[in-house]
Image (cartoon, grey):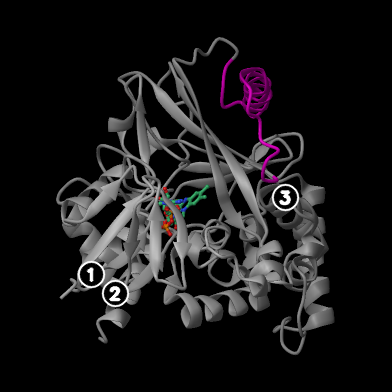
Amino acid sequence: MSPVAPIVIAGAGLAGLSCAYHLKSPSVVFDRELHPGGTARSVSVGGFTFDFTGHLLHLHDPYTRALVRRLLGDNWVECERNAWIHSHGVNTPYPFQANLHGLPRNVVRECVAGVRQARRVFGDRPLDGAGPLHFREWCQRLFGEGISRHFMIPYNEKLWGVPATAMTPEWCGRFVPVPTLAEVEAGARRVHTKRFGYNTTFLYPRRGGIQVLAEAFAKKISALRLGEPIESVDWRKRKICLSSGKPLAYRSLVSTLPLPELLKRLDPFPNDLKGPLESLRWTTVLCVNVGVARPRISGASWTYFPEKKFPFYRVGFPMNFTPHVVPRGCSSMYVEVSYRPGTEPKTPSEKDQLFREIRRGLLAAKILRPDDRFPVIHFAPLRYAYVIYDENRTAALSTIFDWLKRNARTVSIGRYGGWKYSFMEEAIRDGRKAALEWEGI
Ligand SMILES: Cc1cc2nc3c(=O)[nH]c(=O)nc-3n(C[C@H](O)[C@H](O)[C@H](O)COP(=O)(O)OP(=O)(O)OC[C@H]3O[C@@H](n4cnc5c(N)ncnc54)[C@H](O)[C@@H]3O)c2cc1C
């Protein structure tokens, strides 16, 4: 009798690792990389530990919180968010829309007047009965002209790389705090003591960067095959083909690969999925990790940069999460720059040019000093970084997921498998959910 085929898990990021960790049935995980962690991984260079941009653990669910704490043992710290916006030459506390105090007076006046006007026109529940909106309209209804113009639109257009009219606001619910008019007015007069948003505190590994979380999961998983990319999926025979050319039968495939990468590997490629595949859009982020030979260049966790004159949209400071990620007397930064896929700098001279622009911006923002030295400059591209929510996404996903389930006995989960904007906790939950569903729990 031939042995029962395993459940194949494609990808050893947090979603794939969590799925394997929670499954009782035989399973095997494949990843093309030599280390687990996927997007939540770290590198050590010249005594600095860098993530592929900051990866802070925002844990809201008691089960995941307990699991992560168990996996990390005593290797974690809890931090208070200390996030800022740099615009008009000043730093104001995050979120912009609730903390206008400190901006030039004409900007404060314009922003407050904009919210009042929006409330007059659209009422206290500006989204009720509005029907489908694009992101620009959504911002204007909720925040008015001023806040939209000074932060919401320029920041998000920089991050997502598409016009605000080409995005939907579906991703915003959890991520964008919406203060009341009274809160906007109070925040224009003085700094709020109230903390807004989903990420006011977070956990982070004391040592080793976010990589240690994936390593802790990996230790509990017996069938983990790293450095073995999945090349194709013969969905009719229910087999995957590895780079060695070896096929492996699967009972069920749980894929955490970026959705376009899974679809491109379907052999033969189903014509029904051509249109949906072509409609998927995303951004690439180049994370520029910088070691600086000076202590405490900033006290912030991270700072947002909405203005066009800065090439980056956000800069974070890992030494403020834990001092163990930098050599003594040093600081570190992750600088995030967003691109349309394929347009990011690739050659050494393109990267040098980008770094010069970054340095200029950071000098202007008074984060760097002219005589600062950089023992390490490390470029980490994230090819799939942010999934773009547009008018085609929901219908495309429904067709794709339904087809995969019916024809290929495949579920596609995680941030890029599920093709969504989500964070690490959700990847862990997605993996667990897929495992429990398989076991019939
Ligand atoms: C810029 C940025 C900042 C972020 N910051 C935070 C944060 O502060 N806090 C937070 O909670 N979340 C953050 N996230 C989100 C977080 O990274 C993700 O939610 C999470 O890591 C997704 O895990 P995943 O397993 O779904 O996907 P991934 O980690 O992308 O895993 C997919 C895996 O598939 C593998 N793979 C790809 N192709 C193949 C193949 N052919 N064969 C085999 N394996 C393959 C990859 O190597 C990878 O390991 C951030 C994301 C980005 C882009």
Instruction: Tell me if 439 is positioned left or right of 343 in this view.
Output: left
User: From mark 2 to mark 1, how far is it between C-alphas?
Assistant: 6 Å
Tell me, for residue 109, which label it has, or none.
none
Q: Amino acid under label 3?
A: Gly
Residue 416 location (% of width, % of height): 51, 60
Q: Secondary structure at mark 2?
A: helix
At x 32%, y 61%, the residue is 248
Task: Give the residue furthest to the top.
Answer: 371
* Mark toward the start of the polypeptide (3 vs 2): 3
Quadrant showing the N terminus: bottom left
At x 25%, y 41%, the residue is 206
Asked if 337 appears above or below 79 in the picture, the reply is above
Residue at label 3? 161
At x 66%, y 75%, the residue is 272
Instruction: Tell me if 287 is positioned left or right of 354 in this view.
Output: left
User: From mark 1 to mark 3, how far is it between C-alphas?
Assistant: 37 Å
Q: Quadrant of residue 163?
A: bottom right
Residue at label 1? 22
Tell me, for residue 435, which label it has, or none.
2
Residue 309 location (% of width, % of height): 76, 34
* Mark toward the start of the polypeptide (1 vs 3): 1
Magenta region: which residues?
A: 340-369
Disc 2 packing (10 Å; few <14; some 14–19; many ≥20): many
User: From mark 3 to mark 2, how far is it between C-alphas?
Assistant: 35 Å
Q: Are marks 2 and 1 in contact (CB under 8 Å)?
A: yes
Task: Give the residue furthest to the front.
Answer: 1
Q: Secondary structure at mark 3?
A: loop
Instruction: Tell me if 300 is positioned left or right of 438 in this view.
Output: right
Residue 277 location (% of width, % of height): 65, 65
